[in-house]
Amino acid sequence: MKRAEDYYSKLARLKDFPARSVFKLEEMQDRFALLKAGQKVLDLGSAPGSWSQFCLQRLGPKGSLVGVDLEPANFKVLPGPKYRFLKGDIFSSEITSSLRELGPYDLVLSDAAPRTSGSGLVDAQGSLEIAWQAVEIAANTLKPGGNLVVKVFQGGEEGQLLRQIKSLFRRARAFKPKASRNKSRETYFLGLYFEAKVEKKA
């Protein structure tokens, strides 16, 4: 059954963004000033491309962005900041090696999520595994003072991940944008001002 188009879905279509998720990043940008002209940004789980498109519109001609996803991005890339897309799995050693080579980054974004199964516990666990991987990639590719945004489904075990982010960044917090659907269990963890490296999770 096709989900009814809500306010943010209609607004995304009017503004020519591939998905409503762009307004989640826009709100975080307004609150935390994550993006600045001239930065280098990594967008994990970037398809269909709304977050990448939003970033490219704000990075200016000296900025750059690397996107990675299993699926191709679906937006028109206009002349401006340098843009590179890697098709692959963020758990792949080949992809993580390429991301390190293309870094370091000022900002790492992850709106990545597992394919939903219908089981809240299964989906939360899948989301948590992706989020841990995103944090590990960030810890190995961020510049000192860089920032992180990572999505996670709330399922009772995400507290350990937030504690890990707090150990790596000067500031860390959870944030749920207004554009998140009311019934959604998603939230975002933000790490601000990167200070350390993470040990690989066993």
Image (cartoon, rainbow, N blue to C red):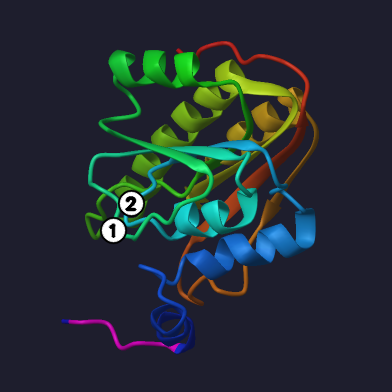
Residue 72 against residue 8 in the figure, above or below? above
Q: CA distance from mark 2 to mark 1?
A: 7 Å
Question: Where's the C terminus, which quadrant?
Answer: top left
Number of callouts = 2
The residue sitting at 24% across, 40% down in the picture is 70
Tell me where residue 49 sits by quadrant: bottom left
Q: Nearer the viewer, mark 2 or mark 1?
A: 1
Residue 66 against residue 184 in the figure, above or below? above
Horizontally, residue 190 falls left or right of residue 170, namely: left
Horizontally, residue 35 falls left or right of residue 84, namely: right
* Whole-percent x, y for residue 123 in the image: 33, 50
Which amino acid, by three-letter code, is at mark 2?
Ala
The residue sitting at 46% across, 52% down in the picture is 79
Q: Nearer the viewer, residue 177 or 55?
A: 55
The residue sitting at 55% across, 29% down in the picture is 135
Q: Nearer the viewer, residue 76 or 177?
A: 76
Kindly identify which numbered label has been placed on residue 74: 1
Q: Are marks 2 and 1 in contact (CB under 8 Å)?
A: yes
Kindly identify which numbered label has been placed on residue 24: none
Q: Which residues are magenta?
A: 2-6
* Whole-percent x, y for residue 64 in the image: 54, 38
Question: Where's the N terminus, which quadrant?
Answer: bottom left
Question: For the residue labelled by badge 2, is the local secondary structure a helix, a strand or a loop?
Answer: loop
* Whole-percent x, y for residue 130 in the image: 40, 36
Which amino acid, by three-letter code, is at mark 1?
Asn
Question: For the residue labelled by badge 1, is the local secondary structure a helix, a strand or a loop?
Answer: loop
The residue sitting at 63% across, 49% down in the picture is 60
The residue lying furthest to the left in this view is: 1
The residue at which mark 2 appears reads as 47
